[in-house]
Amino acid sequence: MCFGTDCEDDVDVQRRSFLVGGVAALAGVALATRAGAQATEKAPPTRVLDDPTIQHGSVTFRSGDEEIDGYLARPKGEGRHPAVLVIAGNRITEEYIPNTCAALAVAGYVGLAPNIYHTVPDSAKTVDEINKALEGHTEDDFLRDIRAGAVYVLGHDAVNPGGLGMLGFCAGGRRALLYADRYPDAKVVLPFHPGKTEASEVTHVKAPVQIHSGTADRHVPVSDIRELERALKTQGTPVKVYLYEGADHGFLAYTRPTYKPDAAQLAWKRAVKFLNHHLGN
């Protein structure tokens, strides 16, 4: 169920706990040694977890008969804001996922990353162990948890209830599209290097879509992105694709060696502008 190197990178990041805003975020959350050194020696320009204008941390909510966790970030103070779900391609304990929620809060949104990999035990360290823990877990199971996150965040007292944005990475980008195909409360979709998605899976997507991917992505070829773009355009779905020259898979994730700061900053600027236009922030 893991796509490309997502699970491999998740294994790498299980080594170092982190604190955000002086408060422990997720128990047992860890980062790769190389990422920790990067963050402590010189904070990446896209890291905003210490921004004093936001508040963030772990939350729990119901998904069917289970209680699952997630990571939520919001602007400080009173008022309501548009919501954006952040759909990870692996466990949400890699720091760039909480950071993405925090970056949304800095931009004036409430960002929630539901832990759709909550069935994977902390003891699962290797790709094989993680995939074994996900045996029998279907896209419907993932979408059920995403839907639970949407219901939770849309009911939050800091959120405008009119609809939400969907932002996803890799397999999470694919699932953001699948969610928008099923649920009309998805008002905008932002997939970053989405996993292979067939035209037949997104025939009901009406929300505008903005896709970000790298020309050097080793796991999501540009041909797949162009194929998805053609399918969406053919059915009348508004879609814009941005390709980043020389960028590899995970170029937005500063916890990974594939991080590309210039591309990450440009992509995020475009993403926020897109969200502002369609969610009215």
Image: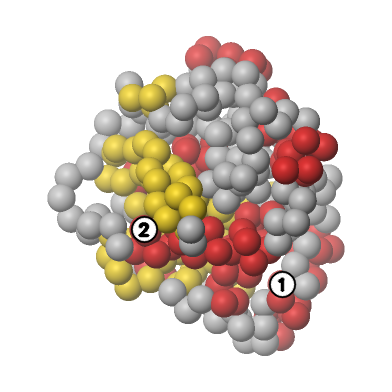
Judged left or right of residue 36, residue 229 is right
Residue 101: tell me if it is visible: no
Q: What residue type is labelled 1?
A: Glu
User: Label 2 to label 1, Cα distance in Å?
Assistant: 29 Å
Residue 154, image x, y percentages: 34, 64
The residue furthest left is 78
Quarter occupied by residue 119:
top right
Q: Which residue is drawn at 71% across and 85% down?
A: 234
Circle 1: is it few (<14), some (14-19), or many (20+) Cα within 10 Å? many
Quadrant placement of the C terminus: bottom left
Residue 45, image x, y percentages: 49, 30
Quarter occupied by residue 71:
top left
The residue furthest bottom is 235
Q: In this view, does 216 lie above or below 209?
A: above
The chosen color scheme is: secondary structure
Which structural element holds mark 2?
Answer: helix
Q: Which of pointers 2 and 1 lies earlier in the amino acid sequence?
A: 2
Is 241 or 19 nearer to us in this picture?
19
Q: In this view, does 241 lie above or below 29?
A: below
Is 45 or 87 nearer to us in this picture?
87
Which structural element holds mark 1?
Answer: helix
The residue furthest front is 65
Is 253 or 265 nearer to us in this picture?
253
Residue 109, image x, y percentages: 34, 53
Circle 2 residue: 153
Circle 2: is it few (<14), some (14-19), or many (20+) Cα within 10 Å? many
Q: In this view, does 4 lie above or below 26?
A: below
Circle 1 residue: 229
Judged left or right of residue 24, residue 40 is right
Q: Which residue is drawn at 51% across and 76% down?
A: 183
Q: What residue type is labelled 2?
A: Val
